[in-house]
Amino acid sequence: QASGTFSNLTAGSYTITAKDANGCTGSASFTLTDPNPCAGITVAVTTNITNNTPCLPANGSVMAMGTGGLAPYTFSKDGVNFQSSATFNSL
């Protein structure tokens, strides 16, 4: 290609070769890695428990607050189903 700019490359090993008008070439090899966006980031969760009584009906609630990382946060009480609300009721 005429341009020396390569866009949208996926993770992998590449060798780029340039050729001048005389047919002389030069090459450079490099590896692109797929960075982990969570590397070095700690997301902390604090909770506030209310109405935690041992009798039925389940009337307790937990309000969570996320810090660190990149907002907005979503929350889950089972690690699978996430919601934007930080409050879990009927516990």
Image (cartoon, rainbow, N blue to C red):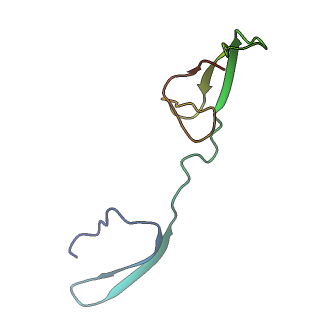
Please tell me how many numbered marks the rendered image carries: 0
Judging depth in this view, the residue of 6 and 68 nearest the camera is: 68
Q: From the viewer's perspective, is residue 29 above or below residue 80? A: below
Q: Residue at x 59, y 33 (%)?
A: 76
- The outermost residue toward the top is 51
- The outermost residue toward the bottom is 23
Judging depth in this view, the residue of 64 and 54 nearest the camera is: 54
From the top left corner, tell me how far across and down residue 41 is, in percent. Answer: 62, 40
Judging depth in this view, the residue of 42 and 46 nearest the camera is: 46
Q: Is residue 52 left or right of residue 65?
A: right
| Quarter occupied by residue 10 | bottom left
Q: From the viewer's perspective, is residue 16 above or below residue 71? A: below
Q: Is residue 48 left or right of residue 83?
A: right
Q: Is residue 68 left or right of residue 27?
A: right
| Quarter occupied by residue 86 | top right
Q: Residue at x 69, y 15 (%)?
A: 48
From the top left corner, tell me how far across and down residue 90 is, in percent. Answer: 62, 18
| Quarter occupied by residue 14 | bottom left
Q: Residue at x 26, y 90 (%)?
A: 23
From the top left corner, tell me how far across and down residue 51 is, in percent. Answer: 70, 9
- The outermost residue toward the right is 54
